[in-house]
Structure formats: structure tokens, C-alpha cells
Amino acid sequence: MEWPVASTFGNILQRAGLTSRKRKKRRATPYSEPFSEVTAPNQLWCMDFKGYFATGDGSRCDPFTITDAHSRYLIRCQIVSRMDLSQVRAICEAAMREYGMPSRIRTDNGAPFAGTGLLGLSKLSLGWMKLGITHERIQPGRPQQNGRHERMHRTLKEETTKPAALTLRLQQKKFDRFRQDFNYERPHEGLNNATPGSIYQPSSMTLPRNLIEYVHPKGFELRRVNNSGDISWHKDRVFISEVFRFEILGFEQVQEDFYKVYFRDVETGEFDAEALRFRSVQVMR
């Protein structure tokens, strides 16, 4: 007797309702945990999009917000026409020129803050790394890990969008008035009834006009990543990640044909030179 092929068995079981279709898992962005305690201004800035709504004339409104976690100071509440890298980076840089740089930035795992590739990095968070800023990412579905920022968003929604202004220009004026009131007129119970503006002080770390070239330790082999995310290793090419395009990586030899790979002072992975295989490090969970 000749047995049916496996696909025939599968079809019989499926028709009988004895199988369940396996769902393809979405590749998740790694998150970073645990988070450090916040005890002073500019130790941590929190960033997010409030969530879009329509103004009176039907225009889509997407506010991007930045707060200082310690003082609750609302650094930015600005409408963007696109939730993309160029606009978010420009707003962040303007805020850092005005207030200095934070030590850490906390966001969710969405674009443009994070990616689904190597270490969850994006071009935006890579730029923060080059400035020496640590990027903290909350767990998916855990907005309470950015709780103070979320509470500000609820207040912002209640006081500026019900009803919304007629146009985007008028809506931005409502946001500007809210920011002034939130920072300087409104006591916060969590601040012993002080206002955020009475506690917040600009950072002593100023945004540099030009990045200082990073110098890897002596003995490291250096490789520049090309436009495709590859490095040249003698006569071969090895894929690392497109997020590091045009950046220099340092290779520290720890065994024969085995290296630790660094972007600046951050370990990003391991490289087996014999097998020509790069493997990223695991993000703390």
C-alpha cells in the first residue's frame, strides 16, 4: 500500500477543522529595559506623537511632543505635516539648540524613532548615539512605561481638541497657549504643586555644531559600511546593516578569526572572519 503524500494529509485535516493556520509573526523591534531613575532635569526627555485628529476644515493634524521627564516641562508641541525622519530630526535639533541635550531619550518602537533591524536602530536613533545620547525604547503595548508623557497627552487632548480649531495654523496657536499654561501657570501635584517652568533648567550639554571624530582604541581594525550595508573584508564583502551606511565600525579581535564589532563605544555584534558571518548582539529584555 502506498501512503498519501504529506500535503494530502494536511488537506484532509484542514477540511475536518483539525488544523489551525500558523500566523506569521511580525518582526518586533527590540526594547531596552530596565530604565534608570530620573532625579534631575534633562536626564531623560520623552517623545511621541499624540495621535492624529481633524481640524474644523478637515485637515489632518499630527502633533509631535517632547517633555522633560523630571520636571514635566513641555519642550515642544508642534504639528508636523509628515511623521518622518526629516521633520522629527529638525524639531529635535531645534529643541536641543534651545535647551541643550538630554542624557537619554525615551520613545516607543515606531518609526522614525526605531527600526526592526539591527538593535532596533533607525537613522534618528543612530544620530542620537553619535551625540552620546542613550535611546530607551518602551515595550510594545506598554505606554505606561512613558506614563508622565501619556498623562500630558490626555490633558492636551481634553483642552485643545474638544473642539479642534478650524485650521492647522489656529490649532498650533492653541497648542502654544496650552504649552505656556502647562509650563508656567499650572501647579502639578507630582511636583509638590510647583510648575514645570519653576523646576526646569536648560542642559549644560550643548548641541555641537560639528561632531567630533570618534577615535577607536588602538589595535582595532576599521571598516566603513557602504551604501548597501556591506563592509569589505580582504577580498570578500560581508553584510552588516543598512542603518550603518557610510559609518565606520571598529573590529576588536578577541580570538583568532573572531571579532567584537563596535559602533563608536557601543558593541553591536560579533564577526566570525572564517565563516564571514556577522551576528548582532542581543538587546537587554
Image: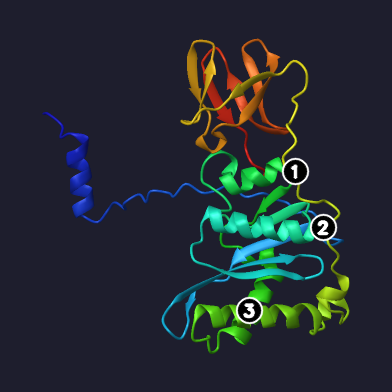
Q: Along the line of sight, which residue is nearer the eye, 171 or 135?
A: 171
Q: Disc 2 or 1, which lies upstream in sequence?
A: 2
Residue picked out by circle 1: 132
Circle 1 residues within 10 Å: few <14, some 14–19, many ≥20? some
The residue depicted at 69 percent of the width and 40 percent of the height is 130
Amino acid type at mark 1 = Gly
Label 3 SS = helix
Find residue 167 and report its horizontal and vertical position in percent: 49, 82
Mark 1–mark 3 Cα distance, whole angstroms, equals 31 Å
Eyeballing the image, is 143 above or below 125?
A: below
Q: Disc 1 or 3, which lies upstream in sequence?
A: 1
Q: Residue 37 carries which label?
A: 2
Question: Which residue, as the protein is rendered here, is positioned at the far left?
Answer: 1
Circle 2 residues within 10 Å: few <14, some 14–19, many ≥20? few
Q: Quadrant of the N terminus?
A: top left
Amino acid type at mark 3 = Phe
